[in-house]
Amino acid sequence: MAEQRLRRIAQVARYALALVFLWHGLVPKLLWPSPDELAMIMAHEPAAQVLVAPATLARFAGWAEVTLALLLVTRPWRWPLLLAGLALLLLLVDVALFSPHLLIQAFNPVSTNLAALALCLVAWLAEAPSSAPVQPQ
């Protein structure tokens, strides 16, 4: 009974986390490219534009986020949760270093990334292997 409940909790956390990555991959990067997304990439100048154009990098990031969202909901693997958590942490640090003015805006990366990190943790803990002995049913 408890295992079933934990699976449902993990599933809800995974779907919510996937929605965050799907939205942020599709809407501001692929469907309606956001000037803020491009500005964050261009804040890394000149390194950001040496290898690839900012718009191309934004599209690549969008597809990566969509792929991660699909992995979170279609595969039982735990590593996408680690990848999501690492990405969220690194992107938050990146914004703090290169675009700190965004940290005080409405719906900023601090609130979004910390909430998504909490979802990663909830799913990770709910999916942790049980140390309790298996009871015959």
Image (tube, rainbow, N blue to C red):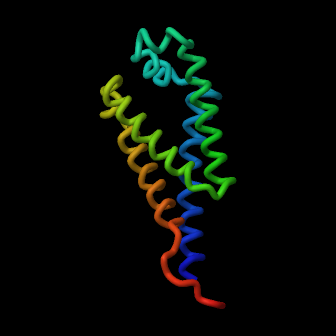
Residue at 64%, 90% (x, y): give it.
136
Q: Is residue 12 left or right of residue 120?
A: right
> How many numbered dots are placed on residues in this image?
0
Q: Which of the pair 41/112 is nearer the observer?
A: 41
* Residue located farthest toward the right when viewing the structure as drawn: 74
Residue 126 percent location from the top left of the image? 50, 67
Q: Is residue 96 left or right of residue 46?
A: left
Position above or below: 51 against 68: above
Position above or below: 39 against 71: above
Position above or below: 132 against 112: below
Residue 3 percent location from the top left of the image? 56, 77
Q: Which of the pair 39/134 is nearer the observer?
A: 134
Q: Which of the pair 6/36 is nearer the observer?
A: 6
Residue 21 percent location from the top left of the image? 56, 42
- What is the quadrant of residue 51 in the picture? top right
Q: Which of the pair 76/120 is nearer the observer?
A: 76
The N terminus: image quadrant: bottom right
- What is the quadrant of residue 39 in the picture? top left
The C terminus: image quadrant: bottom right
Residue 98 percent location from the top left of the image? 34, 23
- What is the quadrant of residue 57 in the picture? top right
Residue at 58%, 48% (x, y): give it.
19
Position above or below: 47 against 107: above
